[in-house]
Amino acid sequence: MTAPDIIKDFPRVSAELVEQARPYQPAIFSDIAGRRGAMHGRIQALRPRMKLAGPAFTVEVRPGDNLMIHAALSLAKPGDVLVIDGKGDQSSALMGTIMMTAARQLGLAGVVMDGAVRDSLEIDEMDFPVFSVGTNPNGPTKNNGGRVGHAISCGGVTVRPGDLVIGDGDGVVVVEREQVAALLPLAAHKVASEAKRIAQIRQGNTAASWLHSALVGAGVLREGEVL
């Protein structure tokens, strides 16, 4: 049986796990997940200070058309991150002040879209987290169907409904919801290890311990050679 175009509900990463993940940078999750899950750098925070974390509420639209985003706003739950496959189109904005105000009023955690937005100054004043491929003053159409609540591709990454989405000034990382609990201890260990290494550097130990063997392995140095 074919799944409906609009899937109204689905399992989500728990609010408890979202709160535990929130303090970590997306870069930390990318590192501990094997450098997987980071969206293409074209998707950036509208303002560098913007951060978000929450379960993905996925939307697929035709380029330049936001009909299905309106449908998604009717179904998304507080804490969700609206993640939109807009095909990377920058010829018109998919959302602006009116829809972002609605998203904020509904308690959504933010919006991530592989597409453009508009009214960026007003969104900045709202302090609502928005990640996009840029801005365009041109408005969208509202004529074409799409899908809600299905797996999508956003910024070159597969995003399933309910997966963890976490973003900051570096960009956006997606973590499969089943993996979040297992990755959290690794994230804590990574942060502690990096803090220890930074402390060593500040004390004058700037040389990377792994560098020599990596250079030998790459054939840049021969055994016995040093920099």
Image (cartoon, rainbow, N blue to C red):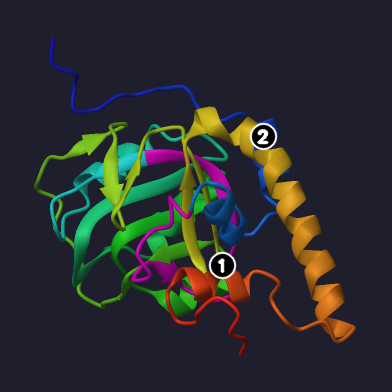
Which residue lies under the disc numbered 1? Answer: 126
Task: State the SS at label 2.
Answer: helix
Q: Is the magenta stretch mostly helix, strand or loop?
A: loop
Taking the image as shown, residue 10 lies to the left or right of residue 210, namely left
Disc 2 marks which amino acid? Leu
Q: Residue furthest top?
A: 1
Q: Quadrant of the N terminus?
A: top left
Disc 1 marks which amino acid? Met
Give the residues drawn in magenta, as a range: 35-57
Q: In x, y percent, where is residue 133?
A: 32, 70
Picture layout, residue 120 above or below residue 174 = below
Q: How crowded is mark 2: few (under 14 residues within 10 Å), some or many (20 or more)?
A: some
Which residue is rendered at x = 70% and y = 32% of the image? 16
Which residue is rendered at x = 43% and y = 70% of the image? 44
Picture layout, residue 227 above or below residue 182 = below
Q: Can residue 2 be seen in this view?
A: yes
Q: In x, y percent, where is residue 146?
A: 16, 40
Which residue lies under the disc numbered 2? Answer: 17
Taking the image as shown, residue 86 lies to the left or right of residue 58, namely left
Verify CB contact (< 8 Å) between mark 2 and mark 1: no
Picture layout, residue 143 above or below residue 149 = below
Is 93 a magenta residue? no
Which residue is rendered at x = 80% and y = 74% of the image? 198
Q: Nearer the viewer, residue 18 or 98?
A: 18
Taking the image as shown, residue 62 lies to the left or right of residue 40, namely left
